[in-house]
Structures are given as C-alpha cells and as structure tokens.
Image (spheres, rainbow, N blue to C red):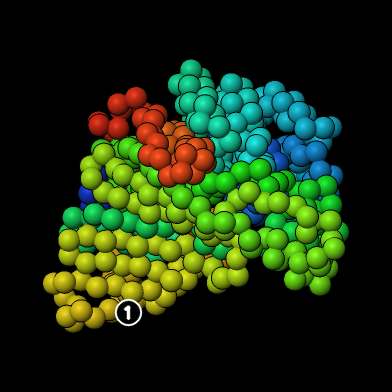
Amino acid sequence: MNAMLYSRRNFLKQTAAAGSLLTLPGVGMFQALAEEKRTTVRIGMIAVGLRGQDHMLELLKRTDVEIVAMADPDPKMMAMAQALIKKYNKKAAVEYGKGPYDYRNLLKRTDVDAVYVCSPWEWHLQHGVDAMEAGKITAMEVCGAIKLQDCWDFVNTYEKTKTPFMMLENVCYRRDIMAVLNMVRQGRFGEVLHLQGGYEHDLRGVLFTNGQTDEPGVDFGEKGFSEARWRTQHYVNRNGELYPTHGLGPVANMIDINRGNRLARLSSIASKARGLHDYIVKNPKGGPNHPNAKVVFKQGDIVNTQIQCENGETILLTHDTSLPRPYNLGFRVQGTNGLWQDFHAGEPEAGFIHFEDKSPHHKWEDPKPYLEEYDHPLWKKYSALSTESGHGGMDFFVDNAFIECIKRDVEFPLDVYDLATWYAITPLSEKSIQEKGQLQEIPDFTKGKWKTRKPIFGVHGEY
C-alpha cells in the first residue's frame, strides 16, 4: 500500500490526474496541492461492531495509520476486531471494554490523534461531543438524530472546541454518483430542478437475528446479534425518515447545500406498518405464536419526505426497509436538459438517462457511456486501490479523505454542518408525520455562513 502514501511530488508527477483537476470548477490550489504536515495518523476506535470493523479493514491496509486503541463493551466484537488486526500483522490495540463509558479513558490518551465513532445511533451525540471536547479529530458514522437539539449540540460543540469533524457518508463517493456530480457541475443536465434519493433496502435480515450467528431469525434486542440488538427498537418506538443521509448526502452535494444553498423546509408522510410483523409471522423461526408476533411496530413501511431548498430545487427522500425488495437507493437528478435515474446499486448500466440535446426523442439511453465519459478524477486515480474495499469501493474513498485531510491539515469535504443538516431530517420528519404531513422549517445550522461557503466536495482528484 505504499501508493497510499503519495506526496505532493508524486502527485505532480501524475500529469493526467493533475490536468483533470483543472477541469473541475471551484478547486483551489491550496486545497489541491496541500503539503503533508504529518506522515502517520494514530487512531482510536469507539465501537468496533461490524461497521467499525469495515473501517478498520480500510485503515489496516494503510502504512500511514496506526490503530492504537479501541473501546466497546461487547467482548465478542472486541475479539473480532483484534483478530482483524492480527490478520494484518499489526500491533494489538489497547482495549477499553469495561462498560459503556470506558471509551472516555481512550479519549484521555495522548497517543491518539483521531477517533472513529461507529456506535449505535443513540450514542452518536455523546461519543461525538466527548471526542471533540477531548480534542480528538472525529469521524462520525451516519444515521439520523434522536432529537433536533442533538444537531445543535454537535454544531455548538464544534464551534466551541474547533476540533475537526468529518461525517462518514460513503454513498457520496459511489462511482456513478460522482460521475453524475461531475456532469451536474459541467452543466450537462442544464439547471437542476429536482432530485431524489433514499434508503430502499430490505433490512429484515439485519433487524432480526437469532443472537448466536448473523443468520436471519426473528429475534431482536438482548437476543439479537449486531444491529438487531439496538436498531430494531427504533422501528418499535419511532415513525420517520430514520436513515436520511445515504439518499440526501449525494444529491445535496450536487446542489451545493450549506455552500451556496440550503435545505429550507420539509413535509413527511408514512404508510401503515405491516412488513416486520408479516416477516415474523411467516418466518420458519417465528410464526403467529412467537412472542415477537405481538410486538407493535410504529415505523411506517414507506416514508416519503419532500424537501424544499432555498434556491428553488425540490428533493424527495424515500425510506423503505421493511418489505421484500431488491436493493436500490432510488437516485434521480432532473434538470432543464435531461435526467438520470438509477435502479440498483451503482452499476453503470443499471439506470436510465436522457438528454434533450443528444438523446433520441422521448427515448431513454444506457447511462454507461456517459458515466464512463464523466468518470470522476478520484475514481480514475484510485479505482485499482479501491477494488477490494467495502461497499463497492466507497469505503476506501471516505476513509482515504479522512486520513489525507488530517495529514494535510485541510478542511474535510463533509463537515459538522452537513451532519447536523442531514441528521435533522429524522426528528423533523417524525414531527411532520405526527402532525399529518405539516411543513417543518429546517434550521440553518451554518447561521448564515451557507451564503459565502464554497463547495469543496469532489472538486479535485487528489483525495
């Protein structure tokens, strides 16, 4: 992985990649050619469940990262994480597993530069605030806020401590998404008017397990395994857009949200809840007499959230995780000159595209040639390194951005204001549904700075 440790000199040698930087609007020379200010980043992991281990896998491949310590009260997950470290012949991490608050002792370490927070959703705020107050550069996994005030607490803590903070929304780095972002910025769709995205993913096998392995079952809570231990309870207690960032993050970058534009207001509606009960009743490990067949799930099977933007665009988010369906995040980008929409998991041919100035009249085209033509410089440069990375290579890019920005001491491409804005969709959608679809104002977490902040996500091809 020595290629991971490229320097400014090596970057300049890559003339093709350097030339591609000049084609992207908004790139600054300082951001693109920033010198490395450190060669090694020392990491602490807060929560090493399966998602935390995904990130560890990316970090362990690198020669510029040391995983120093990790905190998790689950001894099974801790053992799995240590086995992963051993597989890569790295030094075992110091463990902090004495209860749910032992992570605070990890934060006291002077040999930890940055932390990854990959904990259950209800812990994100506490972990993030404590990490920033301890001065540890923070990478935060995705979800939606439990309360709207949580979003302000993230922002206020960041502004008080000035601790660098990045949101780990990996779908922003999906290859087709970045190619479409490139097309948007080069005006290929004309003026963008409407966008769609969501989380349309059959999670029933994740929400229910048998507690001994990760095989699907009908148990959750204390009898569950991994996410079934905590995530399913949100479906019992809540009804809203529970997981907004996968659908919202990529399209928000395309219309410069928090950097020249902002989310203004939303309205949400939910269908009735039937899918999870039906799954339990029909499952061979469940049935109509299983105790969980009596659980009443509050979360609607289909939640649609309409968002209005300050500059006049509209966004539609869909949350659909409790019914049988193939995976699809439902992206659509529509402008005055055409539109693109996907129907699976990012394969270049798995979608439709149409441009008024080029496509046959009233005919869809295969998007693959366009996605290849507008392939983003980041993917052109790093596709080989990302081949074996999680989520189709996306994990490589989001983790690479976090580490490389730390090494250069430059601004993260996805920051605390993005996190607060995207997280806020969840509690606001819950309130809207409770109020029968009433409009909810989305706070301006930048406090007016969105008017002058410039886009930085994906504006160059270095990291």
The residue at the point 51 percent across, 31 percent down is: 148
Q: Nearer the viewer, residue 184 or 463?
A: 184
The residue at the point 77 percent across, 32 percent down is: 100
Residue 129 visible in the displayed image? yes
Quickly name the residue at label 1: 366
Residue 106 in which image quadrant: top right
Q: Secondary structure at mark 1?
A: loop
Q: Can you give x and y, in whole percent of width and height, for residue 157 in the image?
A: 52, 22
Residue 35 in which image quadrant: top left
* Residue 319 left/right relative to 323: left
The residue at the point 31 percent across, 60 percent down is: 333
Crowd around label 1: few <14 · some 14–19 · many ≥20 (10 Å): some
* Relative to 431, residue 335 above or below: below
* Residue 387 left/right relative to 106: left
* Residue 71 left/right relative to 143: right
The amino acid type found where label 1 is placed reads Asp
- The quadrant of the picture occupied by the N terminus is bottom right
* Relative to 289, residue 446 above or below: above
Q: Nearer the viewer, residue 112 or 201?
A: 201
